[in-house]
Image (spheres, grey):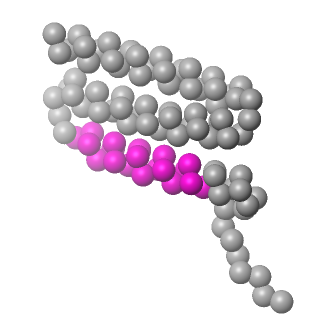
Amino acid sequence: MLDIVLKIALIGFAFSSVILLIRVIKGPSTPDRIVALDAMGINLAAITGLMSMIFHTTAFLDVILLFGILSFIGTVAFSKFLQKGEIIEYERRS
């Protein structure tokens, strides 16, 4: 029974990722695209967790942590770029 529920959840997260990909491509504004990219990172971590449960292994847990960190850093970088127009601020000397 648990295997069936895990596979249904995996299909649901995969379908959600496809919908989010459409939002990234056709998004009405840049902030919407950034939110969709962040949600795709969360979905990818969830899919990896479900695959870890289906395969009965803990080998993918480090990958989930990596997806979370990269998703967070990417969202912060995009947000900073939208706010200030640059990601890395250089100190300007006159």
Looking at the figure, which quarter contains the C terminus? bottom right
With respect to residue 1, does 30 lie above or below? Answer: below
Tell me if residue 65 is in the magenta stretch.
Answer: yes
Side of 24 relative to 53 (left or right) = right
Residue at 38% over, 36% down: 45
Residue at the bottom extreme, as displayed: 94
What secondary structure prevails in the magenta region?
helix
Quarter-of-image position of residue 57: top left
Residue 55: x %, y % from top left = 20, 26
**Marker count (numbered):** 0
Residue 11: x %, y % from top left = 38, 15
Residue 71: x %, y % from top left = 48, 46
Quarter-of-image position of residue 76: bottom right
Residue nearer the viewer, 85 or 54 = 85
Residue at 28% over, 27% down: 50
With respect to residue 79, does 6 lie above or below? Answer: above
With respect to residue 60, does 56 lie above or below? Answer: above
Side of 55 relative to 35 (left or right) = left
Residue nearer the viewer, 49 or 38 = 38
Tell me if residue 47 is in the magenta stretch.
Answer: no
Side of 34 relative to 2 (left or right) = right
**Extent of the magenta region:** 59-77
Looking at the figure, which quarter contains the N terminus? top left
Residue at 34% over, 42% down: 64
